[in-house]
Image (cartoon, rainbow, N blue to C red):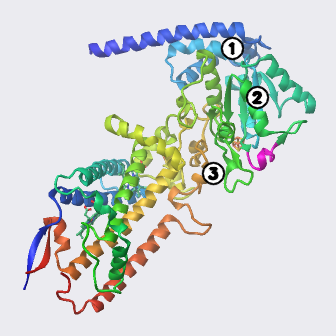
Amino acid sequence: MEHIVPKKEWTVAIRYNHWLMAAAIFVLIASGLYIAYPVNLSFSDKITEMHDIIFWHILTGICLTFLFVWRVYLMFFSRFHADWKDFFAWMNIKNSLKQVKFYLLISKEPPEHTHLYGPLQSVAYGGLLIMVALIVLTGLILTGAAGYKAGLTGIMYTMVRPVERLMGGLASVRLIHHFLSWGFVLFIMVHMYMAFWYDVIFKEGTVSSMISGVVFRKAHK
Amino acid sequence: MGQNADYHSTVSKQYRQLLKQCKVNLDRNDQELPAAAEDFGELLKERGVSRRAFIKWTSLMTGALMLPPIFKPALARAAEQFSRVPVVWLHFAECTGCSEAFLRTSYPGVADILLDTISLEYHETIMAAAGDQAEKCLEQCLHDFPGKFLCVIEGAIPLGNNGKYMRLGPKGKTGVEIAKEVTSKAAATICIGSCSAFGNIPAAKPNPTDCVGVSKAIGVHTINIAGCPPNPVNFIGTILHYLMFRDVPPLDGLGRPVWAYGKRIHDYCERRAHYDGAEFVQQWGDEGAKHGWCLYKMGCKGPYTYANCSQVRFNDGISWPIMAGHGCIGCTEPGFWDTMAPLEKQIHEDTFGGGQATIDTIGTTLLGVTAAGIAVHAAATACRHRDNKSETK
Ligand code: HEM
Ligand code: HEM
Ligand code: SF4
Ligand code: SF4
């Protein structure tokens, strides 16, 4: 006999963090695209469109900065499950190969569920968090350069400014920022596809799990 | 309110103290510096610069140095001492454009008089001496004014082939050797132009001679008056600061004086309102160009460039590139020839691998590939996992 047991997979904090991050990233991609290819929209009598959109981009960017810090905090200090170890699931090479075969539809046997994330997921999510870190870093340099450097942004700017030199000047910082934004666009496509794919293959409710926090594992009695 | 008044009185007290120190410094300079060749007041008269024009110029310079107006008389005194500072001007890998820009300006003003009368003990382009004689001049200067003269360097230093890509003078010394010898005896080293500051065009890819900026080549601290060519105001202001305070001005992380390179071009650009309002020139000579709209889409690099051109302009404030209708090319930033490319297009239109591919064409291609990959994978999954109902545990 087989029945389904709900298992708490994601804590409330992780879920809020995830969807806020996702929302922020959507806003940042849209506004960032505008900053790179500005057009005169004439959507109001106010004649400060570019300025306003940069302002909202930066404001959302600062939100993403905090969300990122929060996510890293949870990674190490979550009271329920500090998951930093799970980002190293890929270290199990045998399991990783199994995962690749499973994804490439060569084998139908999924890898063992050793960590919170599968081996390739650990690479993807780990890499993604690094990408968030980099885009936040370059974004904060651009923010400071754009003149937003009073109070907190001022402190952050002082911390990140030396990186401007390492990257080869503001122009390179901007180029890297633009480069990374493509990474996000590509990631989201694959990420969402894989979420739905998991849902279809495992029928554990992966997509809803990021909302409800619960996956439905099948258990044998 | 009371707090505000307190603040103001504290600040003005500090400025008055600074001014007192400044006067002590100028008195010391008067005793220590060699006598002037020509009387400055006479010179101004001779060149037709009125008293009024001179005072206007001191206001401009005092403001540019971010000092309050009470410093104007001190600055005027420093200007009188300007031509008494012994200067050694070295040329390395460069085009001499900086010297040209400084010494051959056509507009007669105070700045030009200062630059014309600057006490050049050694300057290869304009000195009469040549060969051994020239070498003697240099040795004489190092002997006469050890630790007193300013070393001004124009041009990058090639390090490749043990520095042998650059040999100078009758003894065939390498650039590295000369730079080390002279800077070690100088009171301070000022790098004129982005070449000596950061390597610039001689160091642009592929840089076969391995050119680098002076401070990187010989490991000394330099005051970097970046620009290609730099604004004479920034050079003169730095020397005036040096005379008034007997110290180099505060520098940023790249050795550039903060008073001149603390803000971006974009921050004080006269076209900025059009940027904020999303009014852009789309094509050379279009309606927007006629209206003086923002040049961001024509590749203006003002948002990435720290310099004061938009504040002080060139040639006594007559004009500057963006006013003339071309975007900033970012010449005060390290490696600008490579990092700011393409100069007349936006930064993200840079191409990779020598082809036509920009970030956005690469990104769009990857997007298509990913979408196709997903479609194929989805279809394959549908076939392969057709029969699976409860396969997993
Ligand atoms: C997923 C996240 C993000 C994406 C997709 C994104 C995208 C972009 C893009 C495409 C540009 C235009 C670059 C160009 O012109 O080539 C831009 C500019 C900028 N971004 Fe972001 N960005 C993100 C995150 C951030 C963050 C976290 C911050 C700050 C904390 C930030 C601050 C800025 C600033 C200040 C600019 C320059 C605006 C100006 O011209 O003044 N961005 N971004
Ligand atoms: C289809 C719905 C989605 C599902 C089921 C889903 C599920 C997940 C899961 C399970 C994780 C790993 C959990 C974690 O490490 O916190 C994750 C991470 C992540 N997702 Fe999603 N996601 C979805 C859509 C999106 C979208 C639309 C975005 C961005 C616009 C996004 C951005 C992220 C980011 C940035 C991470 C990595 C950061 C982190 O580890 O917290 N996700 N997602
Ligand atoms: S900085 Fe520019 S103008 Fe000056 S010497 Fe170098 S290339 Fe010529
Ligand atoms: S012309 Fe250049 S510097 Fe001026 S506002 Fe436009 S982008 Fe900025």
Task: Give the chain of mark 3.
Answer: B
Q: Amino acid at mark 3?
A: Trp
Task: Give the chain of mark 2.
Answer: B
For this rendering, which residue is in front, A55 or B351? B351
| Picture coordinates of residue B100, whole percent (x, y) | 75, 36
On screen, residue B276 versus residue B303, left or right, reads: left
Asked if badge 2 and badge 1 are on a common chain, one would say yes
| Picture coordinates of residue B74, whole percent (x, y) | 59, 12
List the residue tagged with mark 3: B337
List the residue tagged with mark 2: B182
Quarter of the rendering containing residue A13: bottom left
**Residue positioned 91% across, 36% down in the render:** B170
Whether residue B295 is visible, yes or no, is: no
Q: Amino acid at mark 2?
A: Val
Labels 3 & 2 near each other (Cβ < 8 A) = no
Q: Label 1, label 3: how many angstroms apart (C-alpha)?
A: 38 Å
* Category of crowding for the residue at label 1, using alpha-carbon neighbours closer than 10 angstroms: few (below 14), some (14–19), many (at least 20): some
Quarter of the rendering containing residue B36: top right
List the residue tagged with mark 1: B80
**Is B163 a magenta residue?**
yes
Residue extent of the magenta highlight: B159-166
**Residue positioned 55% across, 9% down in the render:** B21
Asked if badge 1 and badge 3 are on a common chain, one would say yes
